Amino acid sequence: MNKIINILLSILLIFAVSGCSKDENGNLPDDMKDAALAYLQLEATSDELVDLNNVDDFNLDYTVNTLFEPAFQKLTLVVVYNSDYANQYVLVDNITAVPVTGTITMANLVNAIPALNTSADVAEGDNFHFFVNATLEDGTFLPQFMALGSDPTKATQLVSPNLALALNEIKGVAQFDLKIPVPCAFNLSDYIGTLNCIEDWGGGETYEYTVDVAEDAEYTGDKIGIVITGIFDGAGISVTKMEINPKNLKLVMDEEQMVIEDI
């Protein structure tokens, strides 16, 4: 009889403790769809880097949206300057409906970041990291990145890498966070004129030749046009036309822009 009573008391104690226990996750969402997973989409009109030759012309054209359609109190677009994740500066607050589009200018960044007195303080090697934090309906704050320990440049991302990769498959050109670098200033004069080139075929053999690079006077696009003329592989004279996109420094050439003539 004593054993039966002890068993019953044990069962009652388990129920009592279970009824008083707290959710280990606290107020955190129990499902991804409750987490307001917000992402950024860079529009085609946006700059992908900061051009030191035209710092004040920088524009980040973006769209903010969520992977699912959760109920949230608000979303906040923030920026981290030079990987200091302990300081996340608000650019756009109180986003209560998505999708929403907008533009962040260099003036907006200077106004938000205390370390920048003017745009002249932006230097080679700097970087700007943009992402969206969420506040749920119950007031729970869900940052995309959290600083770890005493080093403000060490941070953890709350979105798993697998989910970040899947986002691109689901939504195309979208990402949970966006980094804009400040590379060295691009000066076309450093790349035009007579240049000595070395072609490496991967087998230890190289072929040296010279080419003349000039700005394409007939190019009318919004990018920079260049013409490369020279002898390639000793087989002929090649005239190649390319374009350089100052928004991302990508070099693009169509096959139709290359002409090879026999000597």
Image (tube, rainbow, N blue to C red):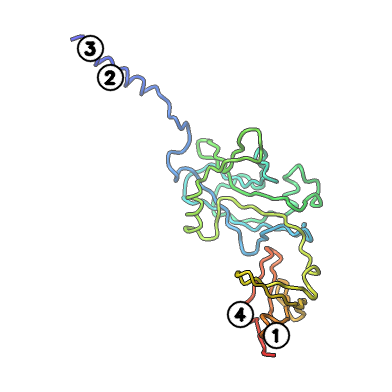
Which one is in front in this view, the residue at disc 4 or the one at disc 2?
A: 4
Where does label 4 land, which residue?
Answer: 255
Q: Earlier in the sequence, mark 1 or mark 3?
A: 3
Which quadrant, please, contains the N terminus?
A: top left
* Secondary element type, mark 4: helix
Q: State how far apart marks 2 and 1 are (Cα).
A: 91 Å
The residue indicated by pointer 1 is 237
Residue extending farthest to the top is 2
Disc 2 marks which residue? Answer: 11
Q: Assess disc 3: are there few (<14), some (14-19) or many (≥20) residues with their C-alpha within 10 Å of its C-alpha.
A: few
**Residue kind at label 1, given as amino acid type:** Ile
Which badge, 4 or 2, comes first in the chain's sequence?
A: 2
Residue matched to label 3: 5
Disc 1 vs disc 3: which is toward the camera? 1
**Dot 2 amino acid type:** Ile
Circle 3: element type: helix
Please tell me whether mark 1 or mark 4 is closer to you in this view.
1
Say left or right for 137 vs 7. right
Number of other residues with Cα within 10 Å of mark 1, as a class: few under 14, some 14 to 19, many 20 or more: some
Task: Name which residue lies at 55% across and 37% down.
Answer: 141
Cα separation, mark 4 vs mark 2, equals: 78 Å
